[in-house]
Amino acid sequence: MSLATRVIPCLDVADGRVVKGVNFLDLRDAGDPVELAKRYAEQGADELTFLDVTATVAERDTTYDLVSRTAEQVFIPLTVGGGVRSTQDVSRLLASGADKVGVNSAAIARPELLGEIADRFGAQVLVLSLDVKRHAGSASGWIVTTHGGRRETELDALAWATEAIERGAGELLVNSIDADGTKAGFDTELISAMREISRVPVIASGGAGRLADFPPAIAAGADAVLAASVFHNGELTIGQVKQELADAGWTVRA
C-alpha cells in the first residue's frame, strides 16, 4: 500500500473537453483538459486520471492525440481509461504518454483481458475502474455498472473486484455512482468493504464536496482520493486537500 496518501484530480473528457455532471448525467463543460492537467500538476497533484467517458458508449477508441498533449504538459503519473478493449489499445496509450490504464466495461465483457494486460505490461499498469451502485438484490449490497454508469450488470461489486485482483489488476478505482457529483461526501461504507477484500491499493472516487470529506475516505481504507468538480470549479485546491489530510494525521507528499 502507498506510504503517502495520494490526491488525484480526475479529468472526465467528452468530445475533447472536460465535463462534469451528477450521478454521471447532465454533463456540462468544465474546461480544456490540457490546461487543467497543467494547473493540477503545478498545484501538487500526485497523479492525474483521464477518463474518456463517452468512448465506450460511442464504441470508439480513446482520443490518443489528447492523451499525448496532456502527457506533454505533466510529469506525474497519468492514468487513462475509456474505450480500452485490447492489449493493443494499452500499448498505444502507453506510447502516447499514459503510465497506467483503466479498464471497466471491456473487462466485464471479457475478463481474460485483465490477465492479458497484466501478463504483457505488469500489474502496476492495470487499474480496474469500478462504477459501483447500491443494489438491494446483490450479495454485498453493491453492483457494477458499465458504459459510464448507464447500464447495470448482475455482477456483485466485491466479488468482481476480488476476481479482477486475482486476474492481475494492480489497483482499484472505486467510484460510487450514487455519490458521484453530489458533493455529499465519499461512500465510506463502500470504501471499507473494498478495503477488506483488496490486497492492492484502493482509490476512492465520487462525492467530494468539502475539505472535511477527504480524511474519512482515508480512514475508511482508501490509499488515494480522487475528485473532479471541486477542483474544476475552483472550490478547492490540491494544496488545501493535502493540508486537510495532514492536519488529520495522514502522510501526504509535499
Image (spheres, grey):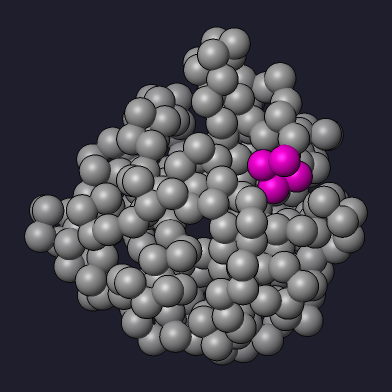
Identify the residue at image location x=52%, y=80%: 37
What predominant SS class does the magenta segment belong to?
loop
- Residue 28 image point, x, y percent: 61, 67
Give, as a single range, the part of the protein colored magenta: 146-150
Taking the image as shown, residue 252 lies to the left or right of residue 100, namely left
Q: Is residue 107 visible?
A: yes
Identify the residue at image location x=12%, y=53%: 248
Q: Nearer the viewer, residue 29 or 145?
A: 29
Q: Measured along the vertical axis of the image, is residue 74 above or below residue 246?
A: below
Q: Measured along the vertical axis of the image, is residue 60 above or below residue 235?
A: above
Taking the image as shown, residue 10 lies to the left or right of residue 211, namely right
Identify the residue at image location x=40%, y=26%: 193
**Quadrant of residue 160 in the image?**
top right
Identify the residue at image location x=34%, y=82%: 43
Q: Nearer the viewer, residue 63 or 184?
A: 184
- Residue 174 image point, x, y percent: 51, 42
Q: Measured along the vertical axis of the image, is residue 112 above or below residue 158?
A: below
Q: Measured along the vertical axis of the image, is residue 40 above or below residue 196?
A: below
Asked if residue 99 lies in the magenta stretch, the reply is no
Number of on-image labels: 0
Taking the image as shown, residue 191 lies to the left or right of residue 28, namely left
- Residue 88 image point, x, y percent: 86, 59
Q: Nearer the viewer, residue 160 or 116?
A: 160
**Quadrant of residue 247 in the image?**
bottom left
Q: Is residue 104 visible?
A: no
Q: Nearer the viewer, residue 113 or 149?
A: 149
